Amino acid sequence: MTTTTTNASDTSIGTVTRLLQRQILPIDRDTDVFALYVDLEEAKLDTDRDAVGGDKAAKDLNNAAIRQSTSTGRKLHPDQIRSRTALRLEPSQTLSFGTYFNAFPASYWRRHTVVDDVELSVSVSGAGATVTVYKSMARGHAQRVDAATVEGDCGTFTFALSLKPFVDGGWYWYDVVAGDDGATVESAEWTAQVPADRAEHGTVDVCITTMLPDMSAQLLGQLGDAEELAPYLDTVFVMDQGKDKVVDSEYFPAAKAGLGDTLRVIPQGNLGGSGGYARGQLESVRKGTATYAMMMDDDVVCEPEGIIRAVTFGDLAKRPTIVGGHMFNLYSRSELHSFGEIVQPWRFWWQTRLDGYSQWDFAARNLRSSRWLHKRADVDFNGWFMCLIPRVVLEEVGLSLPVFIKWDDSEFGLRAKAAGYPTVSFPGAAVWHVPWTDKNDGLDWQSYFHQRNRFIAALLHSPYERGGRMVRESLNHQVKHLASLQYSTAELRHLALEDVLRGPQALHGELATKLADINAFRKQWSDAQLHTDRDDLPPVRRKKPPKKGKSDIEIPGRKATLVAAALAPLRQLRPVRDMSGDYPETELTAMDAKWWNLVKYDSAVVSMNDGTSVALYKRDPAHYRDLLKRTVDIHRRFHREWPELARQYREALGEITSPEAWERTFAPWTDDEAAGSSKGEG
């Protein structure tokens, strides 16, 4: 693929032509993702939710309507895809390239790059075929820009397009209507004249932290198979931290053959995502040959073109910019799971922007009909499932926090933002990943890292003197977990707060041991003891039937919820009911195991979110009283000591994220590598 071309006339005025984006089609012709590349549906723009009245019921009704499908279910036949860039249309068929991967995100280029104008070139064969170019505004309204028709057998049409009207949002795209004999869209390219010093594309070190050898090797195979990606790859680092090694996967030989000397596998102990990514960042900074380091999860399916687009956007950004990709659902592949995220400052919690949606299915409602997708989404950070970081940013602001997992990516985004380096979650760069909703990480061993690392990030970056709502919200969540019989979760969250109080200097030293410690610690409580066979636990029995035959799947109203929240902590002080120590009183699916159901029982069998196991929850009034007292005490302490703790963490940030600190942490494995190399040379 040609990435730049230089014309004599361009050089004289100090500009060159750069390819920004090209038309692409699914590599594997998977019909589940067609809606992300090309669209057959009409575009009926949804209602502007900002125009709906202030009544909550009206807003809820409108939000529900916005999510309703407008799709007829029509799909392309896979045989219509002729190549990575070419698509055949049936006679008189209309197709739109106003899709996630093929529309041009004009507002992002307008806001963040040196590009002022773009040129769209579309090559079509088939007499009578028509190409029509459209643009949208931030509110989603589409406007026809230009059109051209094939007069002979084929034609290449060029459209000059300005980015000036895209301050707040908007896209460009093109639709194609075939003539009587059908048509083929051979290719389409978006190019721009850019300063001559931006002629050469940058290169990237891809940093993959792995615990899943087969998925990792398959991902490496994807990268190696994409020939057009090869010029952009400097090194592909694989931090192999699992018990089973990626080099032993049946898929590894093919991946190695595809990537060749570009691939470097680095074995080290399990230091979590932050330890794996920090190793990749350190190696990239020390090597100093790549323009960027890209963090990428091992359990993803990648669209390789997205890496090229991220690099190109980074090359042409006005200032060094973190360029993140989006996440699609690995199991429902047309569903967007994460589009743009912020850290809400008062609560200090990551969330989808308030003017956006999560879990948006493009097969149900396309880009052109989804008003919210046309407003540019400005973010605080991007998840490290796919995130491109300029090397100069790593050199200035430091590497990842040493926090194992959770909040390393969001804290880094906030740190970079404070230093003047923005993050852009860039449309057209994406991976498919297991969605967060299919995991149980708010209750299992990961709850320790959620709690500890959120507090650390807030101490580092909260603009409020005592962290805003952080301490109060943490207290409320602790009481909720206690009343829900989730004692292991409550204990882990309490342990996390104790560890935060120990200060920042302990983080590096316990990085390799903390996971084993907390797993051993939490197994004391039955809610953390998982059983793959339901029959390992006793059957449901209770002395009295449910009051008035009420079902656990009923969702209480607002008044009933408030009453339950007020009474639940008090109920935990009562003696447990007869039989509940020997037999569970109910059995709850993961989706029904909400706090308002759990607080009713003295024991319950609860299934996990991933569907693989169950656990027995048992109420213990003595444990409840003890942990409730400790919970109140430690949250009072946090409220009192927050300013001093914040000072300690902020003063230590530069040191604990420095390459030198991380080098000391990696020493056990780098020393082994050095010893092995010396022995091999001898």
Image (tube, grey):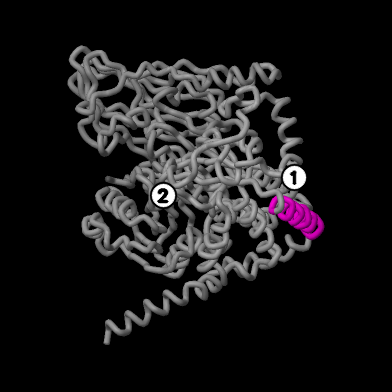
What amino acid is found at the position of numbered circle 1 in the picture?
Leu
Which residue sits at x=66%, y=38%? 599
Report the predominant secondary structure element of the magenta stretch.
Answer: helix
Tell me residue 137's x, y (percent). 53, 25
What amino acid is found at the position of numbered circle 2 in the picture?
Val
Q: Secondary structure at mark 2?
A: helix
Q: If the image is split into quadrants, where does the C terminus sit? A: bottom left
Quadrant of residue 340 in the image?
A: top right
Quadrant of residue 597 in the image?
A: top right
Compared with 136, 376 (above or below) is below
Q: CA distance from mark 1 to mark 2?
A: 58 Å
Residue behind mark 2: 311
Which residue sits at x=41%, y=42%? 430
- Nearest the viewer among 187 and 194 is 187
- Nearest the viewer among 619 and 198 is 619
Q: Is residue 557 magenta?
A: no
- Mark sitting earlier along the chain (1/2): 2
Tell me residue 115's x, y (percent). 47, 41
Tell me residue 3's x, y (percent). 32, 46
Compared with 680, 484 (above or below) is above
Q: Secondary structure at mark 1?
A: loop
Q: Which residue sits furthest bottom? A: 682
Quadrant of residue 269 in the image?
A: bottom left
Residue behind mark 1: 573
How many other residues sit within 10 Å of disc 1, few (<14), some (14-19) or many (≥20)? some
Q: Is residue 110 visible?
A: no
Q: Which residues are magenta?
A: 623-642
Q: Which residue sits furthest right? A: 640
Left or right of 599: which side holds 207?
left
Compared with 231, 569 (above or below) is above
